Image (cartoon, coloured by chain):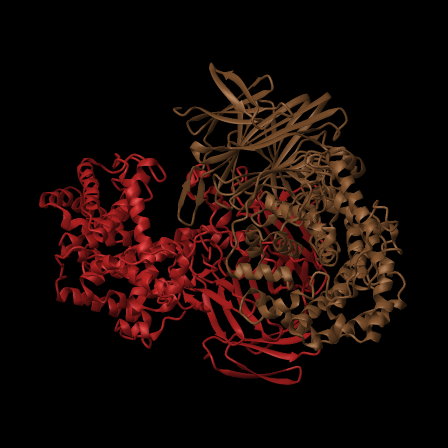
Chain colours: A brown, B red
Amino acid sequence: MVLKMAHVTLFKAQSFSRLDQSVMHLLCLVLATLSILAQSPKVLAEHPNLVITKAQVPLMREALESEGRFKDAYTSIKAQVDAAMQSAVDVPIPKDGGGGYTHERHKKNYQLMLDAAKIYQLSGDVVYANFVRDILIEYAHLYPTLDVHPARKVKSQNPGKLFWQSLNEAVWLVHTIQAYDLIYNALETDERKAIEQNLLRPVALFLSEGQPSTFDKVHNHGTWATAGVGMAGYVLDEPEWVEKALLGLDKSGKGGFLRQLDELFSPQGYYNEGPYYQRYALMPFVTFASAIENNEPEREIFSYRDNILLKAIDTTIQLSYNGLFYPINDAIKSKGIDTIELVHGVTVAYGLTQDPEYLDIARQQAQIILSGDGLKVAQALDMRLEQAYTFDSVAFGDGSDGKQGALVIMRSDIQGPQAVLFKPAAQGLGHGHFDKLTWQFYDKGAEIVSDYGAARFLNVEAKFGGRYLPENESYAKQTVAHNTVVVDEISHFNGDVDIANQNAPKLNFFQSNEHGSVASAEIDTAYEDILLQRTIALIDLKELNQSIVLDIFDVSSDSARQFDLPLHYHGQIVDTSFELSAYTDQLSPLGENNGYQHLWLKASASPEQALARVTWLHDNGRFYSQTSLINDEEQFLFTQIGANDPNFNLRNENGFIRRVSDAKRHRYISVLEPHGEYNPSKEYTLDAQSSLESIETQQIETINLYEIHIANMRYLIAINTEEGIDADATKSFSYKGKSFNLIGHLGVFLIDSSN
Amino acid sequence: MVLKMAHVTLFKAQSFSRLDQSVMHLLCLVLATLSILAQSPKVLAEHPNLVITKAQVPLMREALESEGRFKDAYTSIKAQVDAAMQSAVDVPIPKDGGGGYTHERHKKNYQLMLDAAKIYQLSGDVVYANFVRDILIEYAHLYPTLDVHPARKVKSQNPGKLFWQSLNEAVWLVHTIQAYDLIYNALETDERKAIEQNLLRPVALFLSEGQPSTFDKVHNHGTWATAGVGMAGYVLDEPEWVEKALLGLDKSGKGGFLRQLDELFSPQGYYNEGPYYQRYALMPFVTFASAIENNEPEREIFSYRDNILLKAIDTTIQLSYNGLFYPINDAIKSKGIDTIELVHGVTVAYGLTQDPEYLDIARQQAQIILSGDGLKVAQALDMRLEQAYTFDSVAFGDGSDGKQGALVIMRSDIQGPQAVLFKPAAQGLGHGHFDKLTWQFYDKGAEIVSDYGAARFLNVEAKFGGRYLPENESYAKQTVAHNTVVVDEISHFNGDVDIANQNAPKLNFFQSNEHGSVASAEIDTAYEDILLQRTIALIDLKELNQSIVLDIFDVSSDSARQFDLPLHYHGQIVDTSFELSAYTDQLSPLGENNGYQHLWLKASASPEQALARVTWLHDNGRFYSQTSLINDEEQFLFTQIGANDPNFNLRNENGFIRRVSDAKRHRYISVLEPHGEYNPSKEYTLDAQSSLESIETQQIETINLYEIHIANMRYLIAINTEEGIDADATKSFSYKGKSFNLIGHLGVFLIDSSN
């Protein structure tokens, strides 16, 4: 959905939409800083007052007296805590790295402390407070004895003491300070003193003054650190810590939470690393912001930067299809909107806006947070107040200024929910893939034109310790693993992440109108002296009740090169319009480097027609035909992932590559057409064959025309490539003797329905 | 569920359980024959009186006055009929074979006539009767002009006139005679005369006297023919036709419907070709039996052969897991309990028994038949009377005497619904696969140890016209495509279906008790001079809340041979306990013939330990480890389907083969262990590693002992292989100084839970 103005006015945010955005951010920062200097933070002595406030507790307790989702959630978490309380508390001496026993145990402990502390507040039963207290006291005994963690990584990250990296230590503090705040009133003064002096203060200092490079870093690791330290500042009555958390150790605003809010999201709330890491990044932002709002509402933190946090939450939802996040960059593909970080995000978003569309997502998440906002969500769901969440077609500008390329999502509902993802986005740091201008297609709940995601079996020890597999570098990140052009079998930026981070594509235009959506982008830095330009449109053919995807990819080079355009699909080949030469009794890898060494070459073909069609069938029961206007210029190479994979680390997925050899320029033109139904259960098959008969192209000034003859209809698709025009700018042209008026960038005209 | 005695008494069936079954069948047949000779069939002049009776119509009409499933079904079918009535009726001159236009059109016509005729009865609106009448009149004009179908298959089957094979013509008659019966009262006498004389009588005669070889055949094609002709006998007042339908053209009982009931199902109601064809075969049986019951209730047709039809319906349900049929033999894997044939079957079964467990299946089918029984189902579901259907562990004896081997289903619920299929069954005619003693495993809703099913894209023209693909013969039917022993890379019976049909395995024993289920079987005719013996047990380890499958396969030969035991699995390899030599840069097929030519050899290994373990991860989030006690004797070959498959006709599934070369005998011993959970969405992984530490075996007289050390427990599994013992026969033995009492065939003893 598009954030409604109703939300924005809720936060009394000033509208800077006419100002240059970077100026606006600077202004925001200055204003925020001034407000802090003008008034020392008012730290309340009241407990609890971070995510859960004292005032909310009676309401939550009251809700437990009647049946409903909130009581269900309470009962379930209480049962888990009760079960855990049967065992002795274990606060082991830190020894293991990620995945090892002491690591996992300390992670469990902070979650358990927070859960038990909530149960204390809700039940009023001091046994839960005592349980948390006992664990905290054990930590208070242990912590002063610790040096930095023995399993620390020397080069890559700051170490923790309880954990091998300080990131985990910050997460520990974010949870533990909330638990402490929740049981504060149940503690004796000496207990508080021991816990604060020996544990919480040292941890907060270790994570701030003790590691300035991380604390001041404008990076997700910095967010966890500032969130932990800032929340500790509220609870331990250290306003100075809060100021440092917000503005950096030197309080200049060059680092700190506000700067992170300025830099880490685009103006629309898109996070540079992609949705998989966006949902992870969300957690400390949402948590700390809630604590700021409850302690210092005058900061209007949720209005900051034109409601950037709410936008970030909303964008995370938008970046999903059928409940799963788009798996660009390093992403585990089964991660979706029910991830706990987004449960917190949606809970806070609903608390702020009372927008019933968030309830639709909350219903799908089926998890209730034990907090004041969680209570609101639970009660609204009990009353069935949810309304269908609206997924939009959006170009999410990338980078803090929103101008480092974009991640484009196009949607259609004409054949049920469909989506195109088009990625002229920035690299997205170390987890980014070398896949400039790649795309994906989703239909009938499934990924059809696919992205490999990350090569990783999370936490599976036998698979490289559960970390990113070597094949993540050697295959999943490489350009050929994606659906975009590879030149001379070399990945974009030659696989150099530093150069990649400095060079984003340019989004030339994006528009969504009654005909569908279109976006065009280009990049001339992925390869030296080569320009890559791609235009993708998801178009509704209303008379046929179906959509098609039009894909135009122009490559131009100063010298003759080899261009490969892969298409990775899910499904099984049903038919090709041309003859295949299959390698039936021996397979070899397609190449030697940059991911090519992982592709078996299963068949090749050199179609000698104008149109070359490949049809496959997905398990979802629909057929997909990709028809390319090749004019005898493209060779087709059919591949399967799995070569040079001695440990079966890769999934054996299929694809085909359109190859043009020894060319200075080439235009790839293709149409993807979802069609028909395969229903072996009911024993019928409909429209197993493509109904696309021809594609003709023509250019008239800035207008590119594509005449598509499909299912006895002739459509003229017109795309005005002129940049910067208004959405309703009208351009007239004539084609085959008829006159047309094109409004904006995209027009679809039915020019003949008879044959 | 087990058919309850309550059902049986409903039908006043005599209990022959103490008599030899073949004697019983003969007696049944004689009794039935005598009863027919003693009384001429009482053909009622009342219409309708086939599946729907005149008495049911007012009840159905009344039901349409209130909301509910029955009215919903009526509304939906009426809307379809209304839509179809907008177009002109097309009764084309027969031209095309299966899948072609005239073929599909005539199929649509009979369904449409039947639906419209039902709507006539339910709505009372004569426009629907007239619509059916008009189509029938067109057919009555066309039919006398027809010779046998131009696209007939010369060799394989009798031709029809409207259709290329008479099978379709019989299906046409089964539908059309019902439609005629339903609109009979709306017709003028001359209309009846024209339709009967020019169409229905000629078709019935063509299908009986006109093709004695099919009509008298004890085969599913014969069932359709006798059902059509017999039902026509009732409607057209031709008692002689009914008798011929029941007893064969010569009325001797050597052919005909009763003989088919005797021969085509085993005593437990298992159909020789397997569940995929069982559900198809069910349709004419259930339809004609309903017509017999309504016209001649004194025949007690549903009690015939100890309620064989009800058993056949019930067994069809039992032969499913998670809604899908077990895909043995030629089977499309997405076929399941919602297939229309079983909807009719369950509707009739509920009508007969009012057993609320059938409502559970009906609810999952979510389709209501417009009939008297359909009304009962709809109303019972509206009242939520359903009770969970009980899936049992059963050995379904194969063949008409139940002694041609068996299809064994074992179930466990300790980790959620799990099933083992073990197949010491007969060949099952032309659609049978050469897979004696193969097995499969199902868990968490999914197929884990898999069967390829049929190589076919039903009705997809581009895939070999939608027929069985050539790869169905060259791969799917071959032994190596299954999970059973292949000797010298040659399929069972050398792939000769005639020999295979004559030689079934022998089920030595089967038992299901509190410890789990066990079955043992053997065959010495699959290969000359070779005995194959397999024992499979699905065992609950109650203390660990998990099940395991124990699999013992003995091969003994007069001369030294090569033994291969494949395991086809769904999932991705996570780990092996031994080193793999992977073919990373070149793949070749594993062999040249009998399916081996379709397997790429991806890796091989020669483990030098006592135990060899392969662990894989399924998309269902669970890990599976197969651990084999190999004692350095077995080579492991890892394969993927797809070699010599130039048109991408095969699915690229994975497997591994345990190979023993140059041996006279070998015992394959393995344990399959489902374990742990991979949950990347919630970011946790549990028990990714097998907890099986050792397997020891020992034999004491007829008792085979397997000591399993798993998850710090030591279990002793005892299997008494003595045939013919009672389920509660007790055998004492001592093992490692302790005494044990084994009751029946299977015992599981926890002998040490400390280490």
Is residue B598 positioned above or below B231 on the image? above
Q: Closer to the camera, A494 or B408?
A: A494
The picture places residue B121, in percent across and down from the top left corner, at 21, 52
x then y, percent, for residue B368: 33, 56
Residue that appears at 77% across and 61% down:
A172
Q: Is A135 on the left or on the right of B81, as rendered?
A: right
* Residue B598 at x, y percent in the picture: 56, 45
Q: Is residue A362 left or right of residue A87?
A: left
Give residue A592's quadrant in the image.
top right
Say how many tags the image has: 0
Residue lying at the far top in this picture: please name it.
A737
Q: Residue at the spot x=79%, y=71% of the render?
A: A136
Looking at this view, is A57 or A297 the one in front? A297
Residue B438 visible in image: yes
Q: Residue furthest front?
A: A38
Tell me if B483 is positioned left or right of B575 in this view. left
Residue A146 in the image, given as x and y percentages of width and height: 88, 65
Image quadrant in which the N terminus of chain B is located: bottom left
In the displayed structure, would residue A518 be above or below residue B298?
above
Q: Nearer the viewer, residue B63 or B632?
A: B63
Can residue B166 be seen in the rendering of this structure? no
Q: Quadrant of the C terminus of chain B?
A: bottom right
Relative to residue B168, is residue A680 drawn left or right?
A: right
